[in-house]
Image (spheres, rainbow, N blue to C red):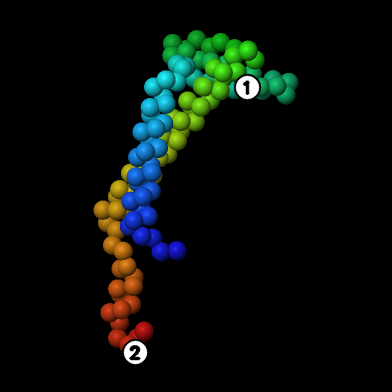
């Protein structure tokens, strides 16, 4: 598969949109961090506040559990997307499409 600059630019645009979307969602995310442990084959969910206090979450708090899990996922997606975008921007600065093809074209017919 041949890389094209248009494909790379499209991917960079998609990543910028993704980062903006996930960052906006994080503004409304609940505070705290979700921890999951297993006890006797059952999952237990704990929320850790910014001050370090931990509290078990009951089954009735599924909405909060889902929101905290989504927050954690969004944070990881943002970090990954930023890393990929950084790599793409470096590649786009140095990218010269068709360099291998140009080398082949410059060869004499006998060497081709």
- Outermost residue, right direction? 40
Q: Secondary structure at mark 2?
A: loop
Residue in view at x 45 percent, y 33 percent: 76
Q: Viewer-nearest of labels 1 and 2?
A: 2
Find residue 62 and report its horizontal and vertical position in percent. 60, 18
* Res. 9 in view: yes
* Residue matched to label 2: 110
Residue 1's spot in the image, x, y percent? 45, 63
Residue 82 shows in the view: no
The residue lying at 37 percent from left, 55 percent from top is: 7
**Which one is in front, 37 or 11?**
11
The quadrant in which the C terminus is found is: bottom left
Using the numbered discs, state the Cα–Cα distance from disc 1 to disc 2 in whole angstroms.
68 Å
Mark 1 highlights which residue?
Answer: 37
Q: Position of residue 23 (x, y in %)?
A: 38, 29
Choose top left, top right, bottom left or bottom right for residue 51.
top left
Dot 1 or dot 2, earlier in sequence: 1
How crowded pointer 2 is (Cα within 10 Å; few <14, some 14-19, many 20+) is rated as: few
Q: Position of residue 5 (x, y in %)?
A: 33, 57
Q: Quadrant of residue 101?
A: bottom left
Residue name at image x 53 percent, y 25 percent: 69
Element at label 1: strand
Quarter of the image holding residue 79?
A: top left
């Amino acid at each position: 598969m041949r890389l094209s600059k248009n494909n790379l630019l499209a991917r960079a645009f998609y990543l910028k949109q993704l980062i903006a979307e996930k960052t906006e969602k994080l503004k409304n995310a609940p505070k705290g961090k979700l921890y999951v442990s297993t006890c006797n084959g059952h999952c237990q969910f704990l929320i850790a506040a910014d001050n370090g206090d931990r509290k078990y979450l009951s089954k009735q708090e599924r909405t909060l559990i889902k929101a905290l899990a989504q927050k954690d996922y969004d944070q990881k997606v943002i970090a990954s997307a930023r890393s990929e975008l950084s790599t793409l921007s470096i590649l786009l600065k140095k990218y010269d499409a068709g360099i291998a093809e140009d080398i082949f074209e410059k060869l004499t017919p006998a060497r081709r």
